[in-house]
Image (cartoon, helix red, strand yellow):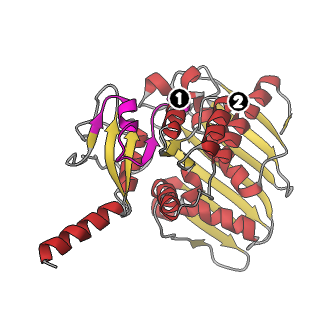
Amino acid sequence: MVPERIAALAEKEEVMSKINVGIAGTGFMAVAHLKAYRQLDNVRVAALCNPSGRNLDGDFSDVFGNIGDDEPIKLDMDGVKAFHDYGEMLADNDIELIDITTPTVLHHEQALAALRAGKHVLCEKPLARTSEQAREIVESSREAKGFFMPAMCLRFWPEWAWVNQAIKDEHFGRVLSARFRRVAEPPAWGQKSFLDGTKSGGALLDLHIHDADFVQFCFGKPKSIYAQGHSKVSGEIDHVLAQYEVNCGAAVSAEGSWTMTKGFGFCMEYTVNFERATADFDNTRGDDCLKLYQEDKEPETLKLNGPDGYAGQIKHLVECILKGKPPSIVTAADGVSSVELCEAAKRSIMASEIVPL
């Protein structure tokens, strides 16, 4: 066989081994996902979709958010299709995976449409604006041709995956207490959607849902929740402090907020106190973010390898697609229950009482 033919076949085989993804939305979350796709070899961005046409030239230098590096993204659009119409992107047979990074209020309709079109779907959290809508998505996914996975990046972030494993293995003994905290100033991006609580659900549903989900990931579904909170910028709950009653008896709480004063920035933390150790994470410490304190040992800073949470979650889904096995680290049902936990927190805040789950 001539060398040119061999090269052509090799190139064709390489293309076929990659999953083609179409990204719905071109805002901050789309950029976070684009940076994740750059870290992976078995998936390629094949299409972008935004009805407004914004950023469809591949230039994302005007897009920013609250986490990750500030490196501007300029996507080489050679071979990447640009769609103004979401339905047209779904009709493209070359696209196998739809990545939904649009505002929360659009998730329900777009996820259902993608599943009905036979696509695999990755949908950013929250799964939907309400748990009722989220359950509709799950019901549709059960009959769908493609796999569906909610994007819960915290489960895949190395420092968070590490503490989840330590909790489940009881490597340092059982957990006595766990505190999770994710607080920031109001979003300076996407304000038309984020700061309209009827669309975003406020910080409770958009930001705090990360930690609500992580609580259930580590400890199982809580038995009850008691929460306090208030609104400040969105008309919905923008600051929440929730206490969870969990099966193992540990004292577990989580705080989420968009109400910090301008200039505060973004802070995510956890402190998990085991019988024989304390693990403390604080993103503001940079490379020294995770510290471990053990009895009769010097404190140590843990340096964990692996892709970030955005790349980790996409890697998991793509590998599942290629193996023909449904996602296991996070499921569609987890996406529903995380929304339900946030709704229970709101009911607790409004009624000033413990809400059984």
Residue 234 within the magenta-colored segment of the rendering:
no
Residue 85 within the magenta-colored segment of the rendering:
yes
> In the drawing, what numbered circle is on residue 109?
1
Mark 1 and mark 2 in contact? Answer it, CB < 8 Å: no
Q: Is residue 174 above or below residue 22?
A: below
Q: Closer to the N terminus: mark 1 or mark 2?
A: 1
> Which residue in the structure is indicated by mark 2?
229
Question: Marks 1 and 2, Cα distance to the nearest angstrom?
Answer: 30 Å
| Mark 2 secondary-structure assignment | strand
Q: Is residue 332 above or below residue 3?
A: above
Q: Position of residue 173 (x, y in %)?
A: 79, 71
Q: Residue at x 57, y 44 (%)?
A: 144
Q: Residue at x 58, y 38 (%)?
A: 126
Q: Start and end of the magenta stretch?
A: 82-108
Query: In the rendered view, does 22 fall on the left or right side of 345?
Result: left
The answer to which image quadrant residue 212 occupies is: top right
Q: Amino acid at mark 2?
A: Gly
Q: Amino acid at mark 1?
A: Glu
Quarter of the N terminus within the rendering: bottom left
Name, please, the residue furthest toward the front. Answer: 1
